[in-house]
């Protein structure tokens, strides 16, 4: 008996590229987002994956230090090596280091706030940062999130990563709610000890 399976629910059982009858299974594409108003206006050239310290400084950023790791994959679950991730976020107080951010919360001189990194040969990436704070915006309260502008082999997409422990705040966030059924693809998985895992599946492949 044949079963009809929608594209929305046809998900691979193994992220590394499972196969049935020699055919690779499609992965669930990670939900995309808009670039937002606070993409860094100036880039100081940081290419390290540690946002908790600023080059040449001696202090560490305020807030809860977290580690985020994952892979960038194509829609067949194959890793995308050398993908570029431009990453930016608010500091622990909920403020971006951007001239257009109207927030009155303090800036953190020890928080880098932006990084540009590349995936390894297995598509992996890792980031050390602080958990971003929530903040008021013209569309309402924004739940904690991290922005990522990812360029793969043949595609470029904007993503926002959300935190699983903020379920109530996520449910009130207009941009998270706008993702609809695809919202869970933007949620990181908690690994314990303030560590998170989040794989990004792009449309290419």
Image (spheres, rainbow, N blue to C red):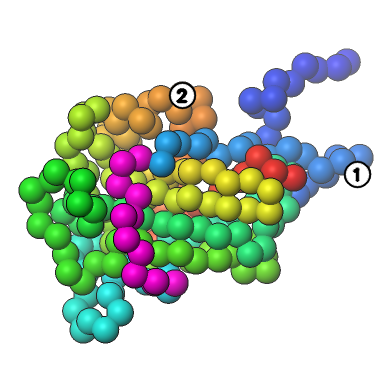
Magenta segment: 36-47
Q: How crowded is mark 2: few (under 14 residues within 10 Å), some or many (20 or more)?
A: few
Determine whether 43 is above or below 190 in the image.
below
Q: Is mark 1 on a helix, strand or loop?
A: loop
Could you classify mark 1 by the number of other residues whose Cα lies within 10 Å: few (under 14), some (14-19), or many (20 or more)?
A: few
Q: Where is residue 32 in the image (x, y as percent from the top left)?
A: 50, 37
Please name the residue shown 45% across and 51% down the image: 148
| Res 22 label | 1
Visible in this render: residue 163?
no
Q: Which residue is drawn at 61% across and 38% down?
A: 29
Is residue 46 within the magenta segment? Answer: yes
**Residue placed under numbered mark 2 in the picture:** 180
Is residue 16 rendered to the left or right of residue 163?
right
Find residue 16 and report its horizontal and vertical position in percent. 71, 53
Real-space Cα separation, disc 1 to disc 2, in angstroms: 32 Å
Name the residue located 68 percent from the left edge and 54 percent from the top edge: 153
């Amino acid at each position: 008996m044949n079963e009809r399976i929608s594209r929305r629910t046809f998900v691979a059982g193994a992220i590394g590229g499972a196969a049935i009858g020699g055919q690779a299974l499609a992965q669930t594409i990670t939900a995309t987002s808009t670039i937002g108003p606070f993409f860094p206006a100036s880039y100081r050239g940081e290419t390290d994956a540690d946002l908790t310290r600023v080059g040449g400084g001696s202090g560490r950023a305020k807030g809860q230090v977290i580690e985020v790791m994952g892979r960038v994959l194509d829609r067949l679950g194959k890793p995308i090596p050398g993908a570029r991730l431009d990453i930016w976020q608010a500091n622990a107080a909920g403020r971006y280091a951007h001239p257009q951010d109207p927030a009155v919360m303090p800036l953190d001189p020890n928080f880098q706030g932006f990084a540009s990194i590349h995936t390894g040969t297995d598509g992996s990436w890792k980031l050390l940062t602080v958990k971003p704070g929530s903040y008021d915006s013209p569309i309402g309260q924004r739940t904690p999130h991290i922005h990522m502008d990812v360029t793969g082999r043949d595609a470029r997409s904007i993503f926002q990563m959300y935190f699983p422990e903020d379920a109530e705040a996520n449910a009130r966030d207009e941009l998270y709610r706008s993702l609809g059924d695809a919202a869970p693809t933007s949620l990181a998985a908690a690994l314990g000890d303030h560590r998170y895992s989040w794989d990004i599946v792009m449309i290419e492949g």
